[in-house]
Each structure stands twice: as C-alpha cells, then as structure tokens.
Image (cartoon, coloured by chain):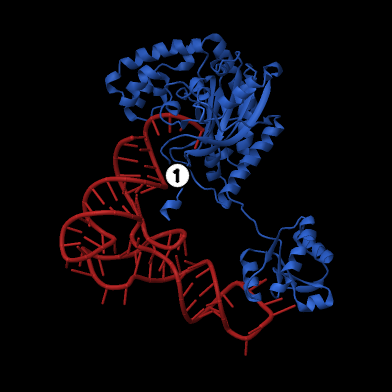
Chain colours: A blue, B red
Amino acid sequence: MDKLRTVRGVNDLLPEVLDKHNQVIETALKISNQYCYSQIETPIFEFSEIFKKPLGISSDIVTKENYIFKDRSNDELMLRPEGTSGVVRAFLNAGLIQDVPKRFSYYGPMFRYERPQKGRLRQFKQFGVECIGLSNPMADVEVISLGKDFLLKLGLLNSTKLKINSLGDSESRLNYRKFLIEYLNDYKTELSNDSINRLSQNPLRILDSKNESDRKIIFNAPNILDYLNQESKDKFQIVTEGLDVLGIKYDIDKNLVRGLDYYCHTAFEFITDELGAQGTVLAGGRYDGLSKMLGGPDTPGVGWAAGIERLSLLVPSHFNNNPDVVLLGVSDEFNFSLLSFMEPLINADLKVEILYTGSMSKKFKRANKINASFAIILGEEEVKMKILKLKNLITGTEEPVNIREAVNVIKTFLNK
RNA sequence: GCGGGUGUAGCUCAGUUGGUUAGAGCGCGGGUUUGUGGUACCUGAGGUCGCCGGUUCGAAGCCGGUCACUCGCCCCA
C-alpha cells in the first residue's frame, strides 16, 4: 500500500475536490473573459533562465524551492514556479509588443519544493491575469477590480481583506533602501537571524517579518511611502483614488512587500484569516522591469495570481453527479437493449447510468444510493407489450411509456 | 531547511498502569420465499495498530530512527 502513495506535497484530486477547483477556475475564466482578458497557456517547464533572471537569484523560489533538471540535450530546464514570467516570455516571443495593451488570463499547475502545509503544496494550481503594455496606473485599478469581482462571484469578498502598498520605481526604492538599512543597522543586534541575512540580500523583506522583536523594530522604521519620488507618489495616488471611486475597500500596509525582484509600484494582496498561515489568496502587483530582465524591450505590466487550492478550501462544495435516470433490466439479457436507450436520453440532455448487475432489489438500492430521480425498467412484460416502465423514484409512482414519453415526463418533472 | 503535534479497519474514533484470537459506529458485501429502493432485522468481508529496529517472557501502548499528515517558522498563491 505504501508504494502506492504520491510524492510528498503532490496530491491526487478526487472528483469532489476537483469539482471545486473547476468551479473556481470557471468563475475566474468567466469574469476575466468579461473584462476581455484572453486565455493563454504556456509550457509547464521552460529554460531555467526564464524564471531565474526575473525572480532574482536571491529569492528562495530560485535558490531552494526549484525543480530544475537537465534534459537529454543537456538543457537546464525548470518546472515553472509561477505564471507571470512564462506569459511575458510568450508575449515577447510572439512579437505581441506591436499590439499593446494585451490582456491575458491563465491557469495551471505550478511547482515549488516547499514544506507542504494546508493550502500549500509542491504541485499547486494558480489562476492569474496579466495586463501588459500599460504603464498607466488605471491598469492597476482595473486588475484589482477584476480580482475583487472574482472573489465577489465566489462569495469570498466578505471573508477577505485587500491590502495595498507601493514599492515605487527603482529610483525611489533604492533611495528608501538606503535609509531603511541605515535604520535597521542601529538595531542589528536585536534582529532575528533571518532578518540579519536579509539585511544585505533583500532588506525590504524584513518589513514583513513575523518575528516579534523584528516587528517592534519595524514599527518605527521609515515608511516607504514617504520616500517615493513625485511620479511614484502620483501613480499610487491614482490607484487609491480609483479604488475609492469604485468603492473597493482596502488598507494601506506600508510593510507589504514582495519577494520577487520584478515588482515595482503597486503591490496588493487579498488575505483571509481562515487558512492559518497561508492567508494570501490572491496577490499581485506591477512588474514594469520584467520584460527587460527577460531580454525584451521595456514593457510595463501588472497582474495577479490566485491559489486555486486555497480558494477551493473556502468555497462550499456543490458536487453532484447524480443521474436523472437509471436504466435497469429484470435480467442480464436486457442489458444490450438498455444501452440502446442511451442515445435518445443523452440527446435530451439527461444524465443516465445503467445498472447492469445484481437482483432487482440490488439495482433499486443502488439507484437510491446514487440519488437517481427516475428508473426505466425493462423486462419480459415490457418487451411483450412494446413499452417501458418508468418509475419516479421520488414519488414512487410507475407508468407505462415509450421512450419519447419517458423523456417528456422526466424533463417536465425535473424542470429541465 | 528548522521547531511542536499526530499516525489503530474505507471514514470517525475506543483501546484503562505493556499480558492470551485488537473493538465500536458509519460505510461496504450477502440475505430476510427471487420483477421494485429509501426503514428494520440477520449475516459477512476488511487491520502484519504508518514503517524499521530496540527494551521485555510478552509491545498498538515504552525507547530510538524513519516516513507521512498537521500547526508554526522560512517562503509564498
């Protein structure tokens, strides 16, 4: 039995769970489509450079959470840990820069070698949207609005909170970084070990440390929003103004930062407190530098990604694959005939299951268990009289019918 | 990668200070005069007590290791 297990952090998706995933994805696709974001699909693995360059060599995703391997022609490949890099790569590769703005949506599996927890897997699915080619902060507002509508459609807007911040442009960020390091250096002895390491690698990330003594120090740290240059300030102003006009509630969180190098200006996340430590359910921001990092022309972009598993955990299940009608014969000899009734029934858009084995009693028990609404019964009597017997399993009534009448009765009763 | 908790039938769990053939409920199979279900009753199958090793006359229960799940850290969707 043990040999049958899946790889750690990689799960089977049984029908009930997969159904919820699909619900979430369908909702996302529908709303994105209405915002005129077109679905795109990129490969599950790419040359590792595609992810390494933009994510930054110091990010954990690249250094310790990657699935990197060499193929038979000795190319270094990487299972994608996120979707944005691939989408931007595809955008550049197809020469779509001639046709901006471009709006894309995507979903699919991502891979990160992390310690599994609830809502965190090594193979997991993300749905995301990218708006490429607009540096206008209206695009940021649009994308957040799309995320909000998505959560609204899932019925999760009330159980999530939107946090936003601005990381500014690279000039502002570098400037802020200088002052932040200066401030933190005064407290170097009190910082956690993790944060001391980050001080040289990626000091902004210290801002979202959960360590208690770190938090006390961060409380009085310089605020990035005070260090934005005028252009960055104006952009952020438009974003918050836009959200206000749209009535989208948000909290500005000056400590909201991004682990990935390519982010700038707007950063945001929708979080819930119903998933423990994995509260981030939809997160994104602006990534104007990404295209250039990949070796393309400077092309702005903004987008977000949402975790399908995490959202699915919050959404109620409506799984139901119950047949509208079951077909059963008095004995095995009627099974071929039963199959021949499939066609008219499925053409009428009904869900049909045939019960092949067991006694009559067994078949009805089975019909009951799978919650069938009707049973069509075929036996010697029916064949002799050239009819079918239709039993309504909800009311218990039976009537002789032909197949066309059966369809009508079933559809009328089920309101289909 | 680091720290805490957990691991007994398909599921939810009992299993007293280590002592003979490991239990319950639900679920599953068969049956209650064979062309009719949801109730009830009868009956059956299913566990090397996560795995490996150790202590012991004897381990599901103690010890060590390992794997998996889970919570937190890291990181992030």
In the image, B22 versus A254, the foreground residue is B22
The reply, left or right, for residue A165 in relation to residue A34 is: left
In the picture shown, does residue A228 fall above or below A309? above
Q: Is residue A128 visible?
A: yes
Give me the residue at 63% from left, 55% from top: A320
Which residue occupies the foreground of this view, A411 or A245?
A411
Query: Label 1 belongs to which residue?
Result: A7
Q: Secondary structure at mark 1?
A: loop
Q: Residue at x 61, y 33 (%)?
A: A148
Residue A346 image point, x, y percent: 76, 57
Q: Residue furthest front?
A: A73
Which sits in the foreground, A7 or A314? A7
Residue A176 pos. (x, y %): 44, 13
The kind of residue tagged 1 is Val
Chain for numbered disc 1: A
Quadrant for the C terminus of chain A in the image:
bottom right
> Could you tell me residue A297's position as x and y percent?
61, 13
Q: Is residue A328 above or below residue A42?
A: below
Residue ID at (80%, 60%): A344
Asked whether residue A242 appears in the rendered view, the answer is no
Where's residue A356, x and y in %?
A: 66, 68
Q: Is residue A50 left or right of residue A331?
A: left
Quarter of the image where one finds residue A324: bottom right
Vertical order, B77 against B29 (above or below): above
Q: Looking at the rendering, which quadrant does residue A299 occupy? A: top right
